[in-house]
């Protein structure tokens, strides 16, 4: 099967599947059964607007959108009674529904089909020094698309952005909403958790244990990421963490602290990468190599 994905000007997706079959030698009766109906059905479902219902409100027999999601559905997306929509709870559950009642504050849904996306067998955490110029938003959006499980923003000695407790909480709320919107756009049914920004030296007090901890490092003893992933036993890791520094890199003291907490320094090659490039490169490689 050859699948072609095209992105239209309004960011919607169109999927075209072409089937090619060559019968095995000597088997005159072999044939391909292309499930064209199911493929067309799935492609059509991808075009449905997606809305979030928190896990605590997820009742398959009585689904409803409330508050911001209801307003977004009725006023922004202009959906009304009789229209079909998709809903998910961010904890794996999803449903295809039809709107049966609609106000600005509440949209009643009748489920037509439901399902559950299994929890990913590999959990990936990004510890990200907050970059300048709003690049944190880009990193979060793309990290969601790459299937990260948690994002922990940190302030380091060389981080330009400095936040007090109230500002940090506001940022967390903003970035969590951004992660939710990214889930809606890309079809991700597991919503990553965005932690409140904290100081790099304090983050280790709350991080869970990981099978593999890495830190992107411009250090003489840093090893290539590929070499570390080829070590015996690494492929069996079920949890991993990668720390990415700010524009001015981590300080020597921060590197020493990370090493003391079990982080292994990794090199990303001879070229100095931008913060957002380094983050997405590492997440892509780790997701590809350790999720399979």
Image: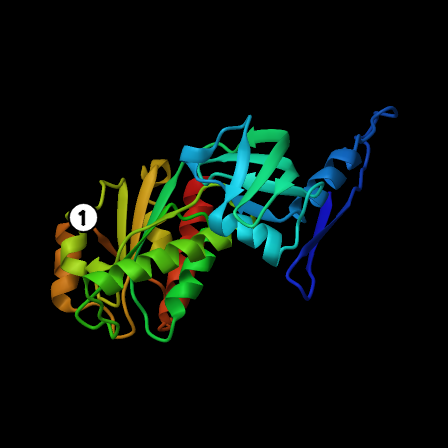
According to the image, label 1 marks what residue? 262
Residue 234 in the figure: left or right of residue 108? left
110 vs 8, nearest the viewer: 110
Q: Is residue 268 above or below residue 101?
A: below
Residue 69 in the figure: left or right of residue 156? right
Q: Is residue 232 visible?
A: no
> Which image quadrant for residue 247?
bottom left
The image shows residue 255 at horizontal and vertical percentages of 17, 61
Q: Is residue 245 visible?
A: yes
Q: How many marks?
A: 1
The image shows residue 64 at horizontal and vertical percentages of 54, 37
> Which image quadrant for residue 224?
bottom left
- Is the residue marked by circle 1 packed among few (<14), some (14-19), or many (20+) residues within 10 Å? some
| Farthest right residue in view | 28
The image shows residue 130 at horizontal and vertical percentages of 29, 66
Residue in the image at 67% along x and 55% along y: 13
Q: Is residue 65 above or below residue 110?
A: below
Residue in the image at 54% along x and 53% along y: 71
Secondary structure category for the residue under label 1: loop
The image shows residue 239 at horizontal and vertical percentages of 32, 40
Residue in the image at 60% along x and 58% along y: 76
48 vs 24, nearest the viewer: 48
How is the protein colored in the picture?
Answer: rainbow
Residue 258 in the figure: left or right of residue 214? left
85 vs 31, nearest the viewer: 85
Residue in the image at 73% along x and 42% along y: 1
């Amino acid at each position: 099967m050859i699948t072609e994905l095209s992105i239209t000007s309004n960011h919607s997706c169109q999927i075209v599947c072409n089937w090619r079959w060559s019968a095995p030698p000597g088997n005159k009766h072999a044939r391909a059964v292309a499930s064209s109906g199911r493929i067309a059905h799935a492609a059509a479902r991808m075009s449905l607007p997606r809305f979030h219902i928190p896990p605590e409100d997820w009742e398959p027999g009585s689904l409803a959108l409330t508050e911001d999601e209801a307003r977004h559905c009725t006023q922004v997306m202009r959906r009304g009674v009789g229209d079909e929509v998709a809903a998910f709870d961010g904890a794996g559950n999803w449903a295809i529904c039809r709107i049966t009642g609609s106000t600005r504050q509440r949209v009643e849904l009748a489920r037509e089909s439901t399902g559950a996306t299994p929890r990913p067998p590999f959990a990936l955490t990004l510890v990200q020094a907050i970059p300048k110029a709003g690049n944190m938003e880009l990193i979060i959006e793309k990290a969601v698309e790459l299937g990260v499980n948690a994002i922990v923003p940190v302030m380091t000695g060389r981080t330009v952005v400095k936040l007090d407790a109230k500002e940090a909480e506001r940022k967390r709320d903003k970035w969590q909403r951004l992660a939710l919107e990214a889930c809606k756009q890309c079809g991700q049914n597991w919503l990553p958790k965005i932690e409140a920004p904290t100081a790099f030296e304090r983050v280790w007090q709350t991080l869970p244990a990981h099978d593999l901890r890495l830190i992107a490092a411009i250090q003489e003893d840093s090893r290539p990421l590929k070499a570390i992933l080829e070590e015996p036993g690494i492929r069996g890791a079920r949890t991993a963490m990668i720390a990415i520094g700010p524009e001015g890199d981590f300080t020597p003291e921060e590197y020493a602290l990370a090493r003391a907490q079990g982080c292994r320094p990794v090199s990303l090659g001879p070229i100095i990468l931008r913060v957002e490039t380094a983050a997405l490169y590492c997440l892509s490689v780790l997701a590809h190599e350790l999720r399979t």
